[in-house]
Structure formats: structure tokens, C-alpha cells
Image: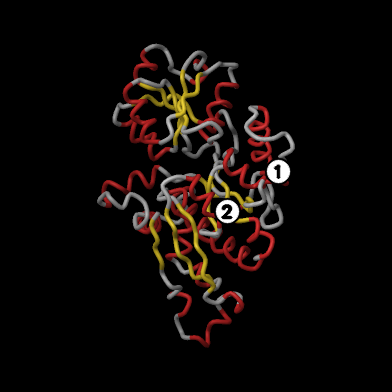
Amino acid sequence: MTDFSRRGALGLIGGAATLPMLGSPALANTRINVGALRFTSHAPSFVAYERGYFADEGLDVEFKFFQAAQPMAVAIASGDADYAVTAISGGLVSLAEKGATKVIGGALSEEPGIDGQMILASNAAFEAGLTDPTLLDGKSFAMTQAGSSFHYMGSRIAGASDATVNFKPLQKVGAIIGAMKSGQVDAWTIVPHIGKALAGAGAVQHIGMVSDYIPDYQVTTVFTSAANAANERARTEAFLRAFGKGADDFNAALVDKTAGDDAAEEMVTLIHKYVYTDRPYEKAAPSIRNGAMRINKNAALNMKSVEDQLGWFRSEGLIKDSITTETLVDPSYVEVI
């Protein structure tokens, strides 16, 4: 985990006398920790930070970077981080059941017509006839662990054609990539910045899109601790407003591409401060652009998708039948769609 902090300098331009104009005076210089992964899908938080939207709301943000979603969820539950973005998983639902976390908004979404998560086949499986997701019967499908978003996607894709698949838990994305390249596993789903690179290099074959099988899938959600959701309303609303402004800028620059070429280049440059930092800009830029998927406006939450995901968890015996959307979600913060 890595910490990165910038004291809301942009929000303090003009001196202390201007503070009441920069959002709620009660929140001036309120310190919050925001959990993040170094993925393009976490860009709204980076944009809100770099462009002063958090500072305008009186929030002094420190990022805490994680290598995976589950440790980030644990950090939210323990109070080590205040807000974050993650997929709905069995682990997140379990924390919500214990009264530790609440989903308060939506983030990354699948949308027809916009490049999203890809369905991939290993070269060996493709050559053996796996040329379409409807041909998954009897094949193996990679996931990190049971109850992960990979598990959910694979099950929904297989279910569309009544296929029986063998799910292989490989724990980490890197291990899955290695297994796909070597033909030890037949199929997988992954975000476009990884999928396009693998397929483009001939390491795997692209056979379909997740959005064709799970329309309007709410891929990731904004979440916080149950205590924050219940007791820190002003701060939570301020975070969501700033996050929403960051999402608007991101969507306009890289998803809808309505902001122009200069704005797109500026956005990629901004994101590169946080994503693919080990690569030179020229090599990182295409992957950042390829990873641009829709972030919901104003962090609106697709409750129909959330209900579908929870229904699947229950049907698989991964969560208790008594767990409902009310267990997981506080719907009072954002529009529910």
C-alpha cells in the first residue's frame, strides 16, 4: 500500500478569507483517505484531486493505493480508508452483512456501443473450437476466487447458453494471464486495457464482449464504512459531488470524446501520474485510452444490476438468503436507476 498526499493547495488560493466560498465551511481542510487501485477505472478520484474538486468541497485527500480490491474493502471497514471504488464481491457483501460497509453509489458500467470488458479464449482453446462464448460448455473459465466479479461474469455468460463450465480460482490477474497464454485455462473476461493488449499481441483470442451477455452491468460501486454513511452525511455528499465532477471530465474526454483532442491528451497525461507509472508515457497512453469505460454520471447506481448480482450470489450459496439490497446499499445518497 502506498500513500500519496497533497494538501488542498488549489482550494486555498486566495488565502483564508476565501474559504467560505469553497464549499461547506464546516468541511474546510477535512482530511479523508481515499482507497484506490492504479487502474484507469479509478480516474474520477484522480481527476477530482488534480483539478481541485475535492479541495473545493473542503476535503484534504490522501490516497491509499492497494494491489487488490479485497484489502481495500477491509481498509474501509476498519477505518483505514474512508471512501473507495470496488466491484461487488462475496467479501464486500460479507462486510456489509456485519454492518461494516455500505455501497453509496455506482462507478464503472458496461454500456452497449462502448468498448468494455472482453471475453477471451486461449489460443489452444480457440484452435480447438472455442470461437464464440456460446461454445463454453465443458470448458474451463478463470477467476481470481469464488464470489469474485470474474466468477459472476463467467457464470452469467455460460448461463446464456446453458453451458457447464469448470471455474478455476487462480487468485491473481497475473497468474490468470500466464494460464491463458499457456493454455492451462480456456476462457476469461477482463477489462479492455488488458484484453486488447493480450489479443493484439496474439497471446489470446477475443471472442466476445461482456456487455452482450450482461447489459448495463454495474461493474464497480462507490462504497464507504457504514459509520460514514450513517454519521458523516455532509462529508460523504461532498466526496460524491467531487467524484461526480471528476467522472464528468473523464467521460467527456475519453468515453464520449466530446471535449476534443487536446482535452483527451490532457486527461491521459493526468491519469498517467497514477496509472502505468512504470511505463514511459508513449507506451502507457494507449492502454489508458483502451481502459476508458463509462463512469456513471453523479455516481448514479444501477440497482437492477445490484439486485441481479445479489440474486446470483444467493443462488450460488455464496451469501445468506436473508441478505438483500438494503443490507448492502444506502440508496439515500445518489440517484438509483
Residue, far top? 128
Give whichever of discs 2 and 1 has the lower sequence position.
2
Picture quarter containing residue 47? Answer: bottom left
Looking at the rendering, in which quadrant would you find the N terminus? bottom left
Q: Residue at x 51, y 70 (%)?
A: 31
Give the camera-side residue of 69 and 127: 69
**Circle 2: element type:** helix
Q: In the figure, 318 relative to 16: above or below?
A: above
What percent of the width, then of the height, locates residue 122? 37, 22
Q: How is the image coloured?
A: secondary structure
- Please indicate whether residue 285 sits to the left or right of residue 336 in the image: left
- Please indicate whether residue 185 sits to the left or right of residue 241 in the image: left
Residue, far bottom? 17
**Residue 325, label in figure:** 1
**Residue 267, label in figure:** none
Give the camera-side residue of 152 and 327: 327
Q: What amino acid type should be assigned to the residue bearing mark 2?
A: Ala
**Circle 1: element type:** helix
Q: In the figure, 49 relative to 105: above or below?
A: below
**Whole-Å distance between the Cαs marked 2 and 1?**
18 Å
Q: Residues within 10 Å of mark 2 (few under 14, many from 20)?
A: many
Question: Which residue is the site of mark 2?
Answer: 77
Q: In the figure, 313 relative to 74: above or below?
A: above
